Amino acid sequence: MLNIVIFGAPGSGKGTQSDNLIREYGLYHISTGEVLRDHISRATKLGVIADRYISKGNLIPDDLMVSVLEDVLDSNPEKTARGVIFDGFPRTIDQAVALNDMLARRGTLLHAVIGLEVDEDQLMNRMLLRGKETGRADDNPVTIKQRLEVYHRQTCPLRDYYIAEGKYLPINGNNSIDAIFEDIKKALAPIVSK
Ligand code: AP5
Ligand code: MG
């Protein structure tokens, strides 16, 4: 079993590299952003609440986000058997502590955190391009600026948290998609072979 967090700023390639990780290791992918966008598109109660935060580029409150993640984990016991890629979760220290607890209660643990490190101008260009191509609602200049600010203030401290836990694997995320994935596989090799 392999449980991985894919960590990085908005637009750093978490979703893109998750697709590669699913193919390579047969892991189950949980993107909290995708879960929330699905609720927004169906106008569920959670979707209506989540939209208030996402549209402004702010984080959904921790207690709500943790309960959403627990629900996803509990509704997919077979699919998560080989392990999970957590994409976009945790985003705060409190969420990281909750994730450790959640995994421990299920008799497992977090094995590694892949940190995609990308220059700020590249992040901005990627999200503006995607906004034009796909119309993703939070990919507009004002919301992107806020997402990046929130990332630096609330999420970046997790990098040191996971370095201290000995789980952080830094990856240069400025390269091509294929080159980045080669680096991820190399970084994971010692963990996968255990
Ligand atoms: P979320 O959906 O997680 O968005 P995000 O973190 O802002 O990240 P993105 O999905 O925009 O980028 P990504 O890193 O997945 O990159 P991608 O592969 O798409 O969260 C959205 C919102 O939901 C949050 O703002 C918050 O409100 C809420 N939320 C979610 N989780 C939460 C939580 N845990 N707690 C509280 N609130 C939460 O790539 C980006 C683009 O670049 C793509 O177009 C891609 O094709 C391109 N690209 C990728 N790699 C490369 C490359 N190497 N070279 C060139 N282009 C590339
Ligand atoms: Mg994503």
Image (cartoon, helix red, strand yellow):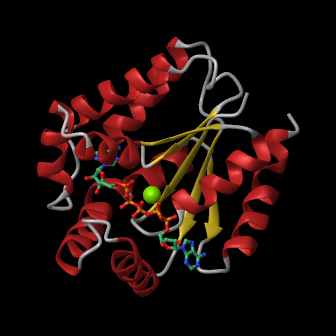
At x 50% / y 54%, what residue is drawn?
7
Above or below for 61 versus 158: above
Q: Ligand 2 quadrant? A: bottom left
Image point (63%, 25%), residue name: 79
- x, y (%) of residue 19? 64, 54
The answer to whether any part of residue 169 appears in the image is no
Q: Nearer the viewer, residue 119 or 54?
A: 54
Q: Quadrant of residue 106?
A: top right
Position of 190 compared to 53: left or right? right
Question: In the image, residue 117 lies at what x, y percent?
Answer: 54, 70
- For the view shown, which residue lies furthest in the front direction? 42
Residue at 61%, 53% in the rendered image: 18
Quadrant position of residue 16? bottom right
Q: Nearer the viewer, residue 66 or 27?
A: 27
Residue 21 placed where, x, y %? 69, 50
Tell which of 152 and 12 is nearer to you. Answer: 12
Quadrant position of the N terminus in the picture = top right
Q: Tell me if 138 is positioned left or right of 174 in this view.
A: left
Residue 43, how many percent across, how many down? 18, 40
Q: Quadrant of the C terminus?
A: top right
Q: Quadrant of residue 66?
A: top left
Considering only vertical position in the picture, is 35 above or below 159?
Answer: above
